[in-house]
Image (cartoon, rainbow, N blue to C red):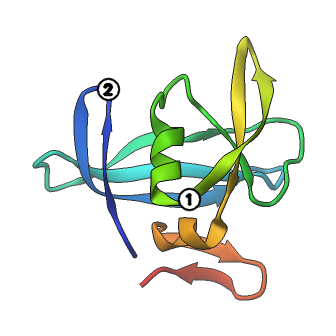
Amino acid sequence: MKTFNYESNCVKYRGCYFDVGEYKNGNISLSIYGYVEDDKNISHISNATVNVDENLRKNNVVIDTYANTNLISFLLDLGIAKGITKRVNVESLSLPVIELDLDKLYEYSYNYVDEQEGLRYAS
């Protein structure tokens, strides 16, 4: 599994990775985990996505840009995001739907569910 360094709200994180999950309606959920600066314990950094009632394409997610202001540009830099496909309204916010390169995402993920293989752990 590849890891990355991330900075959010003036806090630096190291050894970060994504936990890829699924909402009840089948949409992808992403959480970020990593180490806060010199801490020795892993921390949950952020839920990167929000769920919407709409069933999205398999490789699309709604990014919570309210809580993660720089996340889209960061995902683009890592090659995980291909671009913004549209915007959706979530409560009073207009949030972007981004298309993911799932193979690239899985390189930075602790685990993921593969339709053919079931649960697979990154190595």
Is residue 47 among the parts visible in the rendering?
Answer: no
84 w.r.t. 78: above or below: above
Specify few, some or many for label 2: CA neighbours under 10 Å numbering under 14, 14-19, or 20 or more. few
Identify the residue position indicated by label 2 in the image: 9
Which of disc 2 and disc 1 is earlier in sequence? 2
Residue drawn at point x = 25 percent, y = 46 percent: 13
In percent of width and height, residue 4 lies at: 33, 59
Q: Report helix, strand or loop for mark 1.
A: loop
115 w.r.t. 63: above or below: below
Please name the amino acid that badge 1 sits on: Ile
Quadrant assignment, res 7: top left
In percent of width and height, residue 117 lies at: 71, 88
Residue drawn at point x = 51 percent, y = 50 percent: 75
Please name the amino acid that badge 2 sits on: Asn
Q: Report helix, strand or loop for mark 2.
A: loop
Report the residue that reaches farthest toward the right: 54
In percent of width and height, residue 105 lies at: 55, 65
Is residue 77 among the parts visible in the rendering?
Answer: yes
Residue drawn at point x = 46 percent, y = 58 percent: 78
Report the residue that reaches farthest toward the bottom: 117
**Which of label 1 and label 2 is nearer to you?**
1
In percent of width and height, residue 120 lies at: 58, 82
Report the residue that reaches farthest toward the left: 38
Which label belongs to residue 80? 1
Could you tell me which quadrant the N terminus lies in?
Answer: bottom left
